[in-house]
Amino acid sequence: MIKKGFLALLVAFVLFAAFVFFPNSWIKAWISDAHVEQAKTSMAPLMFQGMYLQERMLQESNSMPLYGSSELNRFDPFHPYNYVRATDAPYSTFMIGRGGMQSITHFLNFAAQEKNLKDKKIVFIISPQWFTEKGMVELHFSPNYSMLHAYDLAFNKEIDATLRNDAMERLLQFDTVKRDHLLQAMYQYKMSDGKENPIMGRFAMMAGHVHKALLEKKDLYYSLFPHKSHNLKSNDKLITNQTFEQQLHHAEAYGEKRVSNELMIENKFYKRLENSNLKKLEGFRKHENYTESPEYKDFQLVIDVLKDAGAKPLFVSIPVNGRWYDYGHYPQDRRQEYYKKMEQVLTAADVPYVDFSDHEYDPYFIMDTIHIAWKGWVYLDQELDKYWEQS
């Protein structure tokens, strides 16, 4: 029995050693184009929280990734991925985002990929509902947080030191980060330029380096497994060889079949609202204001890291469903204050952007309460083409 137990322990040790010490460069060589293609629409959290699949994608000369949140998995025939595929566009799209992802999680991702972002065209979709009074909350931060990205930040020599320290200070406000005592010690050591607890700080950095290496290895192995793609809901005949006006017409017809209520919300979602007592939601947004939020500082971190990396981002400011927000008693004039402030932020940053705020009441531009789709995608697809053609 002792020999069997020892043998099992020895096998486990050998397998663990092989897992840890197998050269990263060998494993990276196994990540194929097929793996990257599958990941483009998988929307898998571990893909967002990893590095290697995104690294491969960013190194493709014709890739133009889309960063955002839950709107990216609203697949329909007009979704950018379907549009690019159906029209044989000269660029490819890669969706990076899911529900609950906001500026700070995207910042970590961009910081980890700084060396791959230089001169890279990317698209960043800004959602109004990020800019609440509390901004990013723990409930949304924790499931979208990447421990690998957070540890990488402490060792990142590409990023501007002041920007890195500002980000670390912000991250330490989240319980998920504060509970990681090793990471907390590393951040405090780096933020103090090595002056705070220097001996313990150096030990923390050494231990953190080992932990980061294990996280990288985990990400590498994960990248080798197939990623289930979303149901794309494609219908190429609505896109292929169609003018912009024809695509808009198809999108309107597509929406008309799916919306038959005064709030212009997709029927299946509207039914869920009715089942949960829609009347109780009347006026539920009357105290909201998207002009004062910690999210603005987080969003500035995104702008700053993309500038630091030398990336070429196109920011997209999307509207809310005007009818739904009217129902929630969030008045139009107050919403306009948010749109105007976002325009000021982007203008002051001197970055290219697209402002869709005048589509609040445009039927079928928003598919439910907040998510761009159908006609909205048609407008965005046109902007993607324009941006790709620019030098």
Image (cartoon, rainbow, N blue to C red):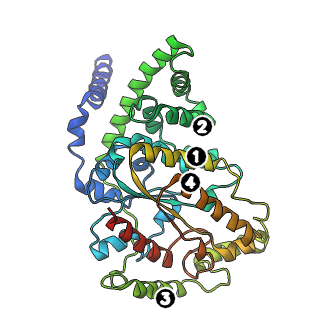
Q: Could you say whether the residue bearing mark 4 is in a helix, strand or loop?
A: helix
Q: Nearer the viewer, mark 1 or mark 4?
A: 4
Dot 1 and dot 2 residues touching (CB under 8 Å): yes
Name which residue type carries label 4. Answer: Ala
Q: Earlier in the sequence, mark 4 or mark 2?
A: 2
**Residue holding disc 4:** 348
Label pair 4/2, CB-CB below 8 angstroms: no
Left or right relative to 200: residue 333 = right
Question: Label 1's element?
Answer: helix
Q: Report crowding for label 1: few under 14, some 14 to 19, many 20 or more residues within 10 A (C-alpha).
A: many
Percent x, y for residue 150?
48, 36
Residue 292 in the image: above or below residue 23? below
Kind of residue sitting beneath label 2: Arg
Image quarter where the C terminus lies is bottom left
Residue 372 image position (x, y, % from top left): 53, 70
N-terminal of the pair, mark 2 or mark 3, is: 2
Which badge, 1 or 3, is on the more N-terminal residue?
3
Q: Amino acid at mark 3?
A: Ala
Q: Secondary structure at mark 2?
A: helix
Q: Is residue 149 left or right of residue 370?
A: left
The residue carrying mark 2 is 170
User: Disc 3 or disc 4, which is closer to the eye?
Assistant: 4
